[in-house]
Image (cartoon, rainbow, N blue to C red):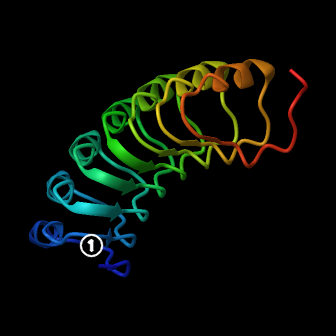
Amino acid sequence: IWLNGLTKLSDAQADALAKREGILSLNGLTSLSDAQAEALAKHEGWLELVGLTSLSDSAAEALSTHELRLNLNGLKDISDSTAEALGNYKGVLGLSGLTSLSDVAAEALSKHEGNLFLMGLTSLSDAQAEALSKHEGFLNLNGLTSLSDVQAAFLSKHDGGLILNGLTSLSDS
């Protein structure tokens, strides 16, 4: 069900929609209460919440229990606590709206199990590259246009698919 025109949702509506299986696309929502996040986390299927630009730590904790696919590509930044919660998510996790991460957040997200989309990142620190190299599953970093030799060495140890389609050059090493 696609309800991308909805900008607001009541707790009762979230409860009702969560009972529907399959794709649940609520990309028009601009905010999500903790209670709504708890309800939607019970949804069985893809959950699309691209309109959210922020997420409370409690809502992130609730959504981390959702299974299958969680698309939060509208988030522009996340706290370390939110990253810690989302690092516990098991499934496909879309966070491609993030343009930067703290080293702590990168370490937390490295614990995520499943495909991880971080296509909005345009650069990484060496510590972030080292942390993300520990991630298991596909790791999409298409926003990166360059890597240092140190970062490339770290990411070469990544166990799973590594997508770097944004790179325009690589050094010989």
Residue at the front extreme? 160
> Where, by quadrant of the figure, is residue 53 drawn?
bottom left
Q: Residue at x 22, y 71 (%)?
A: 9
Q: Height in image: 80 above or below 10?
A: above
Residue drawn at x 37%, y 62% is 49
Residue 133, horizontal then vertical, whole percent: 57, 25
Image position, residue 6 (x, y; %) = 31, 78
The image shows residue 103 at horizontal and vertical percentages of 53, 23
Q: Is residue 42 above or below residue 152?
A: below
**Quadrant where the C terminus is found in the figure:** top right
Of residue 78 and residue 3, the one placed in the foreground of this image is: 3
**Residue 84, image x and y in percent?**
35, 30
Q: Residue at x 20, y 69 (%)?
A: 21
Near mark 1 (Cα within 10 A), the count class, few <14, some 14-19 or many ≥20, is few
Q: Is residue 5 above or below residue 164?
A: below
Q: Secondary structure at mark 1?
A: loop
Quadrant in the rendering for residue 151: top right
Most extreme residue toward the right, as rendered?
172
Is residue 170 positioned above or below 10 on the image? above
For residue 74, side relative to residue 56 (left or right): right
| In-front residue for pair 47/38 | 47
Q: Which residue is mark 1?
A: 8
Quadrant showing the N terminus: bottom left
Picture quadrant of residue 4: bottom left
Say what amino acid the circle numbered 1 marks: Lys
